[in-house]
Amino acid sequence: MLKSIHGEPQFDRQSGRAETLGAEFDGDGTNFALFSENATGVDLCLFDDTGKTETHRMALPDMEGGIWHGYLPGIKPGQLYGYRVHGPHAPESGHRFNAAKLLLDPYARETRGPLIWDDALYGYPVGGSDLDRDDRDSAGFMPKAVVVDAAFDWEAEEALNTRWEDTFLYEAHVKGLTMLHPNVPEADRGTFAGLGSQPIIDHLKSIGVSAIELLPVHGFVNDRHLQEKGLSNYWGYNSLSFFAPQSSYLKSGDIREVKRAIRRFHDAGIEVILDVVYNHTAEGNEMGATLSFRGIDNAVYYLSSPDNPRHGFDVTGTGNTLNVAHPMVLRMVLDSLRYWVQVMHVDGFRFDLASTLGREQSGFERDGAFFAAIKQDPVLSKVKLIAEPWDIGAGGYQVGGFPWPFREWNDKFRDDVRGFWRRNKACAAPLSERLLGSQVQFNHSQRPATSSVNFLAAHDGFTLWDTVSFNDKHNDANGENGRDGHNNNLSDNMGIEGATEDEGVNASRARRAKAMLATLLLSQGVPMILAGDELGQSQNGNNNAYCQDNDLAWINWDGARGDLRDAVAALAALRKDLALAQAAFALAPQDAGEGQPSASWWHPSGREFQEDDWTADLTCLGLYLRVQDAPDRLIIINGGDDAEVNLPEGRWSHRLDTAAETIALDAKAERTLQVGWQSVHVLLSDAA
């Protein structure tokens, strides 16, 4: 750190380099490099260990291609720093430079200290016009970047590279998953130390999870308006730092804690996927704070309104849109992704509002610069890539529109499965599409049958248990008078709104939840479960718990329903045992090629479906699957009352009944099978 330097630090201009952005320690000193196309100068500010005292301010001596850089000998890991960027203050032209504002390095690998909300963080006088300039120093209220040493002993670890056909995703929150777990040490809860603890890993292994998909862990900001209401940005979809992990998730304050957690997951055979937010930042619109990108080069890092560059162009609903079409902004995103793969060893990414990343001048472009860069990248093209295939802009809904190798969250699966199980009319036909991988959306452009990421619930919306417990959202705790959160929940309280001690209602809810879980895990595609859905987690009807950093959203381990946990474990094991997931789409027998799986539909009366059957209001149907070198499978979905199903000719073994006390079976089936109300069954032909 700076104390190792005698006297005023001096740049070594012979050693400075522009090739690598950020602060790079080489064993003897640190190279600092920052991109700003429109700046007239950049000051590097060094701070003491407390982050409160600015000890040195030096102009970066060299610039090429818009990259301002300088090498300081003797600067070691642990040194705190920030930038002040000089340039035109011309908001009407999109330029908002203000050297009074300390700025966080976009390439910071670690941060220290909280963001303390104060009017000095804004580049204009709060309450006045954004065309005016505020010259108060913001350094005392800003987190500082930290120089780090990337060295870590990975013990010759190799990537797991789990096949998509074998992938079972578990969407979880670092803090929410661990805060109430009784066997996670209290001091570790809410951090990566707790996330990588044995009790968490043992649970994931016990239910067959192959990958944990973490809600945002990039450094994010707690919005000022939420803090003023006593709330916080719990989910974390408000990134400010794309390289540094959220500091509050580090018990040790050291990024090696993240690496240790990832290594422990890998040792257990579990991949780690990050939910990343490259569509916008925490700085908001032109009335937001100047924390990093806005002060570094607002006109480059953000999309501007084509009508008036004073304003941003917002297709994310957050106030700004990151300008990924600019080559250096695109480079930052790609550098961030590669950093998390090569240095932190994550296994893939889920891209929030991913349609934004494909926006070009003509709108969404599936062959645009971002996707082309990913496909040719020797690192990123090999990891798991998942798109949230929509944003709020025109033409933003793009389910099925992303290029290979991306997989996509499929909200059509969620909606159609929920609709079927709550007994909506005419749902058999859409359900049949979802069971076979949503081929209308995904069976094109040489995409595999694992392109659809299927889910019943995700972080935004009702949990699975709330889907069977509430008719309406109950978001009063969010302080928005119930205006937030969507209203189309496709839920059904089964007779009583919310929690109840009525044993009959609770049994009915559990029965439907198991049937829905079976539908998820028996469908073609990649299944994803929301953390806590295997435990009967409830958020008391809140379908937008983005600001609830408390036991409303934290997983209630003590209230876990063991029957649901056991059901998920049995279903995951059956899916794997029967190799239900295939890379090739199952087509009608007359269309399936040699060696390709085929699928047909079985009517409960004992015949194959006819065209007119799809227009009838059927609640019971069978999916007849044929896979080469394996027994035929018959999956019976009964969303209605008790029914009889006449099975196809031959001998059948009954392997699954979600209505049974123990859902995994090994019993011979009669020619006529009695199927209970709201249940799912799996049968195998000629089973030993």
Image: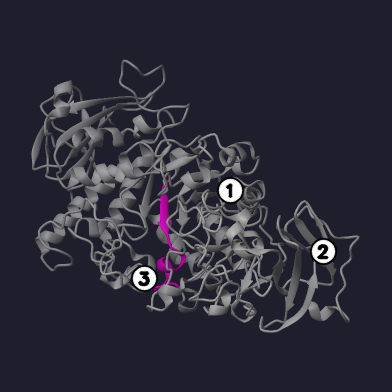
In front of the other: 515 or 661: 515
In the rendered structure, the answer to whether residue 539 lies left or right of residue 296 reads left
In the displayed structure, 176 sits above or below 650; it is below
User: Helix, strand or loop at disc 3?
Assistant: loop
User: Helix, strand or loop at disc 2?
Assistant: strand
What amino acid type is highlighted by mark number 1?
Val
Q: Which residues are magenta?
A: 168-184
In the displayed structure, 538 sits above or below 340; it is below
Density class for disc 1 (Cα within 10 Å; few <14, some 14-19, many ≥20) is many
Protein image colouring: one colour
Q: Give the quarter of the figure containing the N terminus.
A: bottom right
Q: Residue beneath label 3, please?
A: 548
Is residue 180 found inside the magenta-colored segment of the image? Answer: yes
Q: Residue beneath label 2, please?
A: 70
Density class for disc 3 (Cα within 10 Å; few <14, some 14-19, many ≥20) is many
Residue in the image at 60% along x and 47% along y: 159
Q: Give the quarter of the figure containing the C terminus.
A: top left
In front of the other: 153 or 230: 230
Q: Are marks 1 and 2 in contact (CB under 8 Å)?
A: no
What amino acid type is highlighted by mark number 3?
Gln
Mark 1 to mark 2 CA distance (whole Å):
26 Å
Residue at the right extreme, as displayed: 14
Name the image quarter holding residue 16: bottom right
Query: In this orientation, does residue 259 appear?
Result: no
Q: Residue beneath label 1, please?
A: 324
Residue 496 percent coordinates (x, y): 11, 62
Residue in the image at 54% along x and 40% along y: 361
Mark 2 to mark 3 CA distance (whole Å):
43 Å
Residue 588 percent coordinates (x, y): 30, 21
In the displayed structure, 374 sits above or below 200; it is above
Residue in the image at 51% along x and 51% along y: 269
